[in-house]
Amino acid sequence: MKKHNIVKKVLALSAAAALVLSLAACTGGTISSPDGPSVNVGDGKTYRIGICNYVDDASLNQINENIQARLKEIGAERGATFQIDYENPNGDAAVMNQIIANFQADKVDLMVGIATPVAMAMQAATEDAKTPVVFSAVSDPVGAKLVDSIEAPGHNITGTSDYLDTNAVMDLIFAADPNAAKIGFLYDVGQDSSTAPIAHAKEYLDAKGVAYVERTGTNATEVAQAAQSLVADGVDAVFTPTDNTIMESYLAIYETFANAKIPHYTGADSFALNGAFLGYGVDYANLGRETANMIADILIDGKDPATLAVKTFDNGTATVNTETCAAVGFDYDTIEAAFAPLCTKVQSITTAESFGDLAG
């Protein structure tokens, strides 16, 4: 069992931001640079932000890291200080609700919920207080009843979505293996992010006349058993959406599929980083940066979350793990050629625990 590891972190204004503030006092609100355009400078305010990340996994951690890095840049650019309290309940609902209550007691100016369960809990907790909430990595914000619509959220909450184009993933399965006759689904029935993609996958396969089998898990032990069951079921490929429960367990199960020569198609590049054959979807680093931009829109520029449209992204990048590609019996060059017409980009990756490990 993973211990509840609640991490607190404060992001202070950098030395560069201090320089921005001193220059602003002399320039009356803008800084002119001979090497670039003028930069808007804020009012020197300090904004307190509470970030809650649902679980410790590669995709969600990447979002948090990029939110904080981008806010640091914005602080330097705009003359503002972002004081950040970061916490992670590791999927424990009671701890998550306590974190949110603490944010409220600390009177944060804005909350950030990374993943659907956190966003939903924050929405419920702030309905009366009207504290702005910005979510990230919510696959179906309308279906989760977080917003009225993508274009006009209608409440004190907006954010960024990692919506998955399930049909595109299904197309990739049959581009690699036109004769695939049985597809396995691996997911957690309790994850809202899996509900719509699994339903769409069933519709796709029903229309194509291809059989499918479902195996689910709500914890690491059940996920491992579900993976072994799919191998025993004799599936030709496995599909998992942007499911945090499966992602959290993935380093422990990827070899189950690789050794059985079963390609696993998933809804995020972090799965491929952790050993899956393919991850298809959004760039989570960019998702984090765009989330930070929305935070600044609300806190510095005074935009209303109710009218600030949810940001969605082109799900066109296919990330192939070259080690697993070889293990399941595919030639990478052949796969890249098959996938290229169906994707904005095909990129390769090798197995690591986190994205930071790739640079090490």
Image (spheres, rainbow, N blue to C red):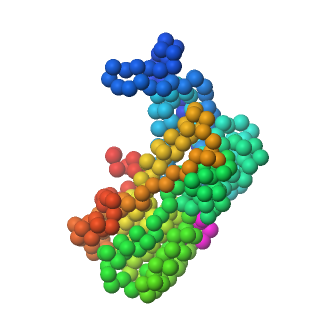
In the image, is 49 to the left or to the right of 282?
right
In the image, is 113 to the left or to the right of 288?
right
Q: Which residues are magenta?
A: 187-192
* Nearer-the-camera pick, 26 or 349: 26
Report the label total: 0
Residue at the location (64% across, 47% down)? Answer: 306
Residue 185: x and y in percent read 49, 76
Whether residue 256 is visible to the viewer of this picture, yes or no, is no
In the displayed structure, 83 sits above or below 163; it is above
Residue at the location (57% across, 70% down)? Answer: 195
Residue at the location (46% across, 84% down)? Answer: 207
In the image, is 264 to the left or to the right of 96?
left
In the displayed structure, 73 sits above or below 142; it is above
Residue 127: x and y in percent read 74, 49
In the image, is 27 to the left or to the right of 327?
right
Residue 281: x and y in percent read 42, 60
Task: Check if residue 191 falls in the magenta segment.
Answer: yes
Q: Main secondary structure of the magenta part?
A: loop
> Residue lying farthest top?
26
Task: Check if residue 59 falls in the magenta segment.
Answer: no
Say which quarter of the image contains residue 170.
Answer: bottom left
Residue at the location (58% across, 23% down)? Answer: 43
Say which quarter of the image contains residue 347.
Answer: bottom left
> Residue lying farthest right?
128
In the rendered image, the quadrant that contains the N terminus is: bottom right
Whether residue 48 is visible to the viewer of this picture, yes or no, is yes
* Nearer-the-camera pick, 45 or 49: 45
Residue 141: x and y in percent read 59, 58
